[in-house]
Amino acid sequence: MTPEQAPSDGLAEEDVSTIIAMAWQDDTPFEAIAAQFGLNEQAVIELMRRSLKARSFRMWRIRVRGRAAKHQTRQVNAQRDPHQIGSGDFLNHGLNEAQDTFPLPPSPMSRESLI
């Protein structure tokens, strides 16, 4: 990192490198970065924008946007509601409802035989 790129947050270069590594890890939530370094999610995003090349930053943003593992509150909500319909369950539920509404003619093939 060059002096022009040094963050104005008063963070040491080693801390910036550690924060970047933690931000790239899938299993490290933003809350862990905030607890260790005092940077909230928006501050981490700004630090990443300043520290990474434009393409690397865009790839990182695409990777972490909406990822439950990067947000402890989303992890807790997902664990709290085990009956929430996931995307695969939602599709199966919709197919079952469609089958009831629009029955198919008899066929030697079944869903079970295709699995």
Image (cartoon, rainbow, N blue to C red):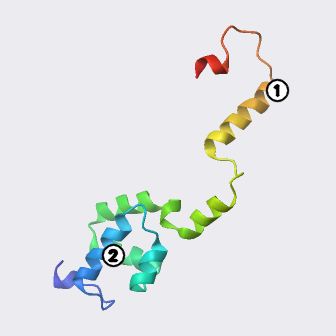
Residue most toward the left?
Answer: 2
Quarter of the picture holding the C terminus: top right
**Can you identify the residue that label 2 sits on?**
19
Total number of numbered discs in the rendering = 2
> Residue type at mark 2?
Ile
Q: What residue do we see at 77% from left, 25% from top?
A: 99
Name the element at disc 2.
Answer: helix
Name the element at disc 1.
Answer: helix
Which quadrant of the view contains residue 16?
bottom left
Residue 77 coordinates in the image, percent (x, y): 64, 64
Where 100 sits versus 84, above or below?
above
| Disc 1/disc 2 C-alpha distance (Å) | 52 Å
> Residue type at mark 1?
Asp
Q: What residue do we see at 29% from left, 85% from top?
A: 7
Q: Which mark is residue 100?
A: 1
Q: Earlier in the sequence, mark 1 or mark 2?
A: 2
Q: Tell me, yes or no, if residue 104 can be seen here.
A: yes
Residue 17 coordinates in the image, percent (x, y): 26, 75
Q: Is residue 47 left or right of residue 107?
A: left
Residue 93 coordinates in the image, percent (x, y): 73, 37
- Mark 1 touches mark 2? (CB < 8 Å): no
Q: Is residue 52 left or right of residue 106?
A: left
Q: Tell me, yes or no, if residue 66 can be seen here.
A: no
